[in-house]
Image: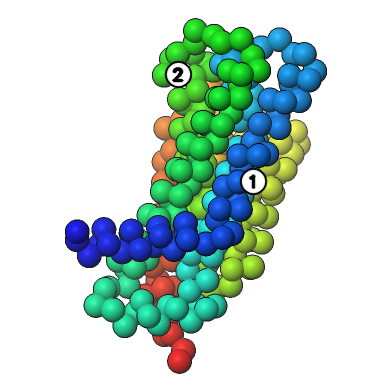
Amino acid sequence: MSDFVQLVWNETLKIYLRVSTWILLIFLVVISPTMLLLMHMSEIRLGAHQAIGQSFTMYFLVILFSLIIASDSVAGEFATGTIKLLLIRPWKRWKILCSKFLSVALFTLVLTLLFLLVISVISYMLFPSSSSALFGDSEGSLFLLLLYNYIRALLLASFAFMLSALFRSTALAITLAILLYFAGNIITPLLHAFLQPKDYWIVKIFLPTNLDLTQYMKDPNGLFGVTSIGWSLMVLAVYFVIFMLISWWSFTKRDVKA
């Protein structure tokens, strides 16, 4: 096993050996089906495939839990002093940082797959099965819905990860990351309501308006009609690189106080 793979494995173990992580996983399993149960109680007529798509409104749980883990990834090491045990090892700092982010990305993927598993099982238990294909090209394609939401969660996790490395405070990183998430959900519809069409160019590089890739499942030009899936992916890639560069600078250039 290479040193880097060992690093990623160690960081992954750190996440799953925490009691708080298992509390989050249990909470996700218990709360995720809430929307499905409400729809079933309301006797809304849906197929299982449609019910799963509607249940993605609960995906915010995956995002929030990912932000919590990402915010603690670097800051937690400094808070407990265990960062010194990492830095005295013969591993370069950039490898340590990359292994930490990869463990966060894998945890976000596990949360996403667990979320999909739970809502799929409950959907087929409560609603009639449908013949829609998971990897279909229809507007309600669950594969695209899953992929777009995961990309959103990963980008927000990278922002929280940057804050964790920059401020070295778990509480501050979690607070700012959650504020960005909820502020984006509020600001985007406000911009759509109050901006004139001639001013829509402003939103082309605005992070929140490009985060929700599911908008392109309804309109290829997006909510504002001035973007595309390719454009938003490019913008998100630029933001991701910026977040990672800031994380790298903060983690590699600053001294660790004794």
Residue at the spot 45% in from the left edge and 78% down from the top edge: 82
Q: Amino acid at mark 2?
A: Leu
Q: Amino acid at mark 1?
A: Phe
Q: Which quarter of the image is occupied by the C terminus?
A: bottom left
| Callouts 1 and 2 close, C-beta under 8 Å | no
Q: Position of residue 38 (x, y in %)?
A: 76, 25
Q: Residue furthest right?
A: 42
Q: Which mark is residue 100?
A: none
Residue 179 horizontal side relative to residue 249, left or right: right
Q: Position of residue 222 (x, y in %)?
A: 56, 27
Q: Position of residue 128 (x, y in %)?
A: 61, 10
* Relative depth, front residue between 98 and 249: 98
Q: Which mark is residue 27?
A: 1
Residue at the spot 64% in from the left edge and 68% down from the top edge: 171
* Relative depth, front residue between 8 and 194: 8
* Label 2 sits on residue: 134
Specify which label sits upstream in the sequence, 1 or 2.
Answer: 1
Work out whether 177 lies above or below 234: below
Inter-mark Cα distance, 1 to 2 = 26 Å
> Tag 2's secondary structure?
loop
